[in-house]
Amino acid sequence: MNLLPRNEHNVERIIRVLVGAGVLSLAFIGPATPWGWLGLIPLATGLIGSCPIYTLFGISTCPMKPTNGTTPR
């Protein structure tokens, strides 16, 4: 079992990085609230490509890879 399996689609990763950076910017710009530090979570999971909650519940948004040489349906 892999500790950090890749379970996020590339589009989802980009969205997480953008949202995470936007929320993180709230810690420095705008209302300058400590809640902006929560942006580190989507930023980190987007950069790593693995979401611990997805792993916990067995969810994956990655496209399926063929296992026996056939194309997935």
Image (spheres, grey):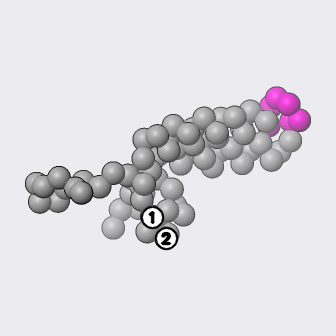
Q: Which residue is drawn at 80% across and 47% down?
A: 35
Does the CB distance between marks 1 and 2 fall below 8 Å? yes
**Helix, strand or loop status at disc 1:** loop
Q: Main secondary structure of the magenta part?
A: loop
Query: At which x and y percent is residue 56?
Result: 49, 69
> Image quadrant of residue 1?
bottom left
Left or right: 21 in relation to 10: right
Q: In this view, does 67 lie above or below 44?
A: below
Tell me if I can see residue 47 in this picture.
Answer: no
Q: Could you tell me if residue 53 is visible in this image?
A: yes
Which quarter of the picture shows residue 29?
A: top right
Q: In the image as oriented, which residue stretches furthest toward the left?
A: 69
Residue 7 position, x and y percent, is 41, 55
The relative height of residue 35 versus residue 18 in the rendered view (above or below) is below
Instruction: Tell me the element at label 2.
Output: helix
| Amino acid at circle 1 | Ile
Q: Residue at x 22, y 56 (%)?
A: 72
Task: Using a 10 Å C-alpha cutoff, classify the residue at mark 1 as few (fewer than 14 neighbours), some (14 to 19) or many (20 or more).
Answer: few
Badge 2 amino acid: Phe
Q: Mark 2 points at which residue?
A: 57
Res. 59 mark:
1
Q: Which residue is drawn at 71% across and 38% down?
A: 24
Magenta span of residues:
27-32
Q: How crowded is mark 2: few (under 14 residues within 10 Å), some or many (20 or more)?
A: few
Would residue 14 be found to the left or right of residue 43 on screen?
left
- Residue at (17% x, 59% y) in the render: 67
